[in-house]
Image (spheres, grey):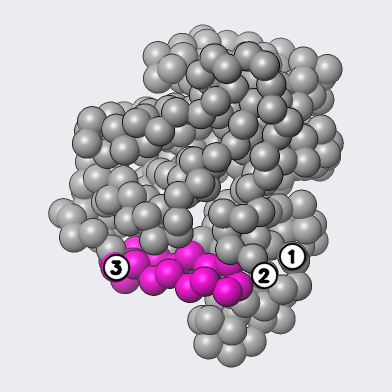
Amino acid sequence: MNANEWISVAPERKDSRIMKPKVIGIGEFLWDVLPSGPRMGGAPANFACHASALGADAVVISRVGADASGEQLVKQLAERNVSTEGITPDPKHPTGTVIVKIGEKGQPGFEIVPDVAWDHIAVTPALEQLVGNADAICFGTLGQRSPSSRDAIRRLLASAPARALKVFDVNLRQNHYDRSTIESSLELADICKLSDEELPVIADLLGLHGELRARLEQLISQYRLKLVVYTRGAKGSVLTDGSEWIEHSAVPTCVRDTIGAGDSFTSAVTMGLILGWPLEQIAESASQIAAFVCSNDGAVPELPAALRERFLSVRMELGTRV
């Protein structure tokens, strides 16, 4: 079964108005404090911002402090045409922050402040309703570092319709992960996205053996995944569904920093799958978008029209998945 065959078709509806796919990022939402100053961050927010730029009705589900910092963070998200209806205020915990240091090759290092608002995501009927209308949901390990947010994320995933793509972005950070979290997330996911730095850690924890292809195929087989997305920086990427194997070279670029590049790649893959594209086309577009992000400062630079239009030119009928 290739990656496009398993994208289900919802029942046909009489209303034929055009709609956007609803794409949700759930987990950490915070300030990245860079040498150049604070910027909106968190993988789910970066993912949602890029999805919005590519034509999605994008939403972030998270939590911020009931403070000026949280208010400004939510305002910045709204300015990027991402819905903030999934973000709730926390009167007891501050808005999240991460101290970011950029290495010689543009690789970021992170100091992630503990016990902040996004560690305390709580399920509400409104959030369950949001997820119940989703076409795709992206989540990772960092957002699950606290028991309360981990439980909330899993409960919300359980509220998603069967047709929704559940995208697990491994996103290992410091010591904010363990085997149990990774395994249970893989069991919930349709798609796993991981990097060349993360695969050796995952292989160690899960007992994956052999060369690259064997390890990725074991991931698919053991956890019944529909697709694995493997990124390796300047060496390009691999997309595989267990039968089709697409290797794509990286698009040459002058790297400013790599913050958000993986999130943009994940977003482009997700949107490409929703639109029914072949894996080769998805890999090409995702690589170009990630290269552009790497060539700019910050996680969510404004994407040029040429990169956005190939997604925006494809319209979805209300209630259908291509």
- Mark 2 lies on a secondary structure that is helix
Q: Earlier in the sequence, mark 2 or mark 3?
A: 2
The location of residue 62, given as percent across then percent down, is 64, 27
Of the residues shown, which amino acid type is indicated by label 2?
A: Ile
The residue that disc 1 covers is 224
The residue that disc 3 covers is 249
Q: CA distance from mark 1 to mark 2?
A: 5 Å
Q: Quadrant of residue 304?
A: top left
Q: How many marks?
A: 3
In terms of depth relative to the viewer, which is nearer, 14 or 311? 14
Residue ranking furthest to the left: 254
In terms of depth relative to the viewer, which is nearer, 7 or 144? 7
The residue that disc 2 covers is 220
- Asked if the magenta segment contains residue 256, the reply would be no
Residues at discs 2 and 3 in contact (Cβ within 8 Å): no
In terms of depth relative to the viewer, which is nearer, 270 or 60? 270
- Asked if the magenta segment contains residue 238, the reply would be yes
Residues at discs 3 and 1 in contact (Cβ within 8 Å): no
Q: Residues within 10 Å of mark 1 (few under 14, many from 20)?
A: some
Residues at discs 1 and 2 in contact (Cβ within 8 Å): yes
